[in-house]
């Protein structure tokens, strides 16, 4: 997925504009100490300089002067302002300079070159007590389309019994195939005439299967296997059949999305449990970000499909695509907030004494079994000048195991 898929409307202090190009630049602040007649320099990394954003803005139209005057006023205001970057989103910036270019090729329009400097980001405390969001309730995306399908089946039973039995058999065969893919067995018979019951029951089957104890294979591998099965289930009714109504397709989409959310919820719950019991947490922030991206991608596809439903189809099947889109957006936001809160949750810190001379890579390997966490130790100890030669007797701040 490229940047063009997620472009945002650019604006500054609420004044919208078209952006032709952007250039974000970040430089390091380095303190160089060098003795006379020496080719060797001692370089100390002092961190990053403020991020700079250069934009080429294009204004056009017979009324472009109105927007030009508004932008000039916004640029002239003192203090930081809110910039909506077309790719990076919201940033608080200061205007450094701007240049307005009029040319003979564009009569009703102009180009503006402007340089912004990103204001100092609000520093996050390393360890802040957070209340993680409660478990996500995903049944609301199922119940509304399920009720629409149930009403449709009741009407079809009286209107066209032959078609009614065809629809019932198709749903029954599909559910049997779905449970065969998931590897579950029902002790009771599905009530096909009650879509809310069998739809929620199918998602409950996914929940029961979604266990991610870290005893054999990695949790992220088990989650990926579960998602692959959910994808196969979602494609059971992919073949376009004339008896598949818009209400039924909408319900099956919601079941697929809810199943993916349920699987993500399970891996988040397992990670929380491992952290609370001080067990080795093998689900990395990158793994959690992958889970979030996959779920949000599926929700995004479902939203796009809902928006393709015409008003005529919606009235015929008594469904509300706009309401379903709102449910999906809420679900996507909940998934994002829950996983982001988990990513930002950090283990407690401790003072670790250095018993033998070593390097941070050796210490990371000794503490966590992962030498790549040496960078983490460096970030927690910014006052120690040379972390390459740790001496016995020193104490470093580290995350608890």
Image (cartoon, grey):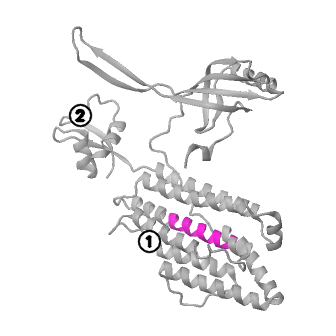
- What residue lies at 57% left-to-right and 61% top-to-bottom? 134
Q: Which of the two residues, 394 or 301, is positioned nearer the viewer here?
A: 301
Magenta region includes residue 251 = yes
Dot 1 crowding, Cα within 10 Å, few <14, some 14–19, many 20+: some
Range of magenta residues: 250-265
Residue on which disc 2 sits: 388
The disc, 2 or 1, on the residue closer to the chain's N-terminal end is 1
Residue 89 picture location, percent across and down = 61, 39
Q: Is residue 296 left or right of residue 227?
A: right
Q: Is residue 108 left or right of residue 133?
A: right
Q: Is residue 254 left or right of residue 179?
A: right
Quarter where residue 106 is shown: top right
Toward the top, the furthest residue is 36
Marks 2 and 1, Cα distance to the nearest angstrom? 42 Å
Residue 278 picture location, percent across and down = 36, 59
Q: Which of the two residues, 16 or 34, is positioned nearer the viewer here?
A: 16
Residue on which disc 1 sits: 211
Toward the front, the furthest residue is 105
Residue 135 picture location, percent across and down = 56, 63
Judged from the image, the secondary structure of the residue bearing numbered disc 1 is loop
Residue 84 picture location, percent across and down = 65, 35
Q: Is residue 375 above or below residue 155?
A: above
All told, the count of numbered labels is 2
Dot 2 crowding, Cα within 10 Å, few <14, some 14–19, many 20+: few
């Amino acid at each position: 997925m490229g940047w063009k898929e997620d472009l945002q409307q650019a604006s500054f202090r609420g004044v919208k504009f078209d952006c032709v190009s952007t250039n974000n630049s970040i430089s390091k602040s380095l303190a160089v100490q060098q003795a006379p007649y020496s080719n060797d320099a001692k370089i100390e990394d002092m961190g990053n300089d403020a991020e700079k954003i250069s934009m080429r803005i294009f204004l056009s139209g017979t009324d472009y002067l109105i927007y030009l005057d508004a932008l000039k006023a916004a640029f002239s205001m003192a203090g930081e302002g809110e910039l909506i970057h077309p790719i990076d989103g919201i940033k608080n910036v200061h205007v450094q300079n701007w240049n307005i270019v009029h040319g003979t090729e564009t009569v009703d329009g102009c180009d503006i070159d402007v340089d912004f400097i990103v204001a100092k980001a609000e520093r996050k405390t390393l360890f802040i007590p957070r209340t993680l969001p409660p478990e996500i309730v995903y049944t609301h995306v199922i119940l509304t389309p399920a009720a629409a399908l149930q009403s449709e089946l009741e009407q079809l039973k009286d209107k066209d019994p032959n078609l009614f039995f065809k629809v019932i058999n198709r749903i029954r065969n599909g559910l049997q195939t779905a449970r065969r893919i998931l590897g579950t067995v029902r002790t009771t018979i599905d009530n096909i005439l009650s879509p809310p019951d069998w739809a929620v029951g199918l998602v409950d089957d996914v929940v029961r299967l979604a266990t991610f104890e870290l005893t054999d294979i990695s949790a992220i591998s088990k989650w990926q296997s579960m998602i692959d099965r959910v994808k196969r289930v979602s494609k059971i009714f992919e073949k376009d059949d004339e008896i598949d109504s818009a209400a039924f397709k909408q319900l099956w989409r919601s079941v697929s999305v809810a199943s993916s959310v349920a699987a993500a919820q399970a891996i988040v719950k397992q990670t929380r449990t491992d952290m609370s019991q001080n067990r080795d947490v093998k689900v990395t922030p990158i793994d959690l970000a992958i889970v979030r991206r996959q779920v949000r991608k599926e929700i995004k596809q479902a939203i796009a499909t809902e928006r393709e439903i015409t008003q005529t189809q919606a009235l015929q099947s008594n469904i509300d695509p706009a309401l379903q889109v709102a449910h999906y957006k809420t679900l996507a936001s909940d998934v994002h907030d829950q996983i982001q809160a988990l990513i930002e949750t950090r283990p407690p810190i401790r003072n670790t004494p250095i018993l033998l001379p070593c390097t941070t890579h050796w210490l990371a390997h000794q503490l966590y079994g992962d030498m790549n966490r040496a960078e983490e130790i460096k970030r927690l100890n910014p006052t120690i000048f040379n972390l390459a030669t740790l001496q016995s007797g020193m104490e470093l701040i580290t995350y608890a195991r």
